Image: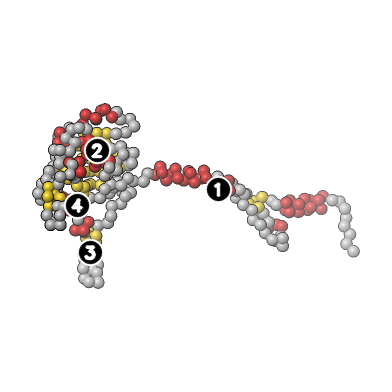
Amino acid sequence: KSDGNGDEAVDETSNLKKTCRYTYCLRDKTRKGYYLQPTTLPDPNPNCFVCRNAIISLNLNTQEWTLDMLLSRVIKKELGFQEPTILVGGDIVYEEGEDIDPSEYAINLPKKLVNLPSGGVAHGSVIRIEDYSQDLEVDVNVSHKDVWMMKADDDSGKEKVDDREEIDKFEIGGKKPVAAATAADSSDGAKDNAAQDPAAEEDDDDDIEIIVDDDTPAKDTAAVSSNGKKRKTDMEEDGNKAKKAKVDTDDVIEIE
């Protein structure tokens, strides 16, 4: 249950990993005689589409905050979105990008969050924020909070009413989303490395030759081309020419 200010929701989100466990049912009992073995929850996988779609909580005064305040102070400054698309109730209330006309959604910027289209943003509403330029997505669970307290200036430990400006009165709970690394960056880096070292490609086309000692018979000496076929060496060609010359001659050789 929540008391209306969202404090308990923030605590539940931050303590989720500490309180929840995976429990495995074992076929064979452990050395201590247990068949159930609990383990802590693993960290989210940044390469997983589901895991990287974070859910965070946001406490603020939905009746005083405007969409422009939310965009500049929280979405861009705190969460790091560059070209955000904001959806409320499945409908787009604001969008940025190369092919987007800024005046199309400018009418919603000065509106209070509760007065936005699609029913507005109130306590318990979920805002979806997307940024395809960063491959970044997050769901924001909004809780209304209109009473803010802060520690007194003295050392008494008492609290007083928070007198900061409204745009500074908010709380973010949960782990902030992180932009996923794109495969395009990796491929561009590989291309740059290849361009910086053109000699590496040229070396691949060179023939591979096997060098042997002078004592090795000529018939065992061969050069291997890049297509895997053997080529006759000069020694083999000279030897074959000499053999043909001896066969073709009509001279008689006398042996004393």
Q: How far is disc 3 from disc 4 in space, using C-alphas?
A: 24 Å
Residue 13's disc is 4
The residue where tag 1 is placed is 200
Under circle 1, the secondary element is helix
CA separation in Å, label 2 and label 1: 49 Å
Q: CA distance from mark 3 to mark 1?
A: 53 Å
Callout 2 amino acid:
Leu
Give how far across and how far down residue 29 sits, in percent.
23, 68
Q: Amino acid at mark 4?
A: Thr
Q: CA distance from mark 2 to mark 3?
A: 45 Å
Estimate the x, y position of residue 119 in percent, counting from the top left.
14, 34
Dot 2 crowding, Cα within 10 Å, few <14, some 14–19, many 20+: some
Q: Which residue is mark 2?
A: 71
| Disc 3 target residue | 37
Residue 177, horizontal then vertical, whole percent: 28, 47
Q: Is residue 129 visible?
A: no
The residue lying at 22 percent from left, 35 percent from top is 68
Residue at the image point whose x is 12% and y is 50% from the top? 160
**Number of numbered discs present?**
4
Q: Earlier in the sequence, mark 2 or mark 3?
A: 3
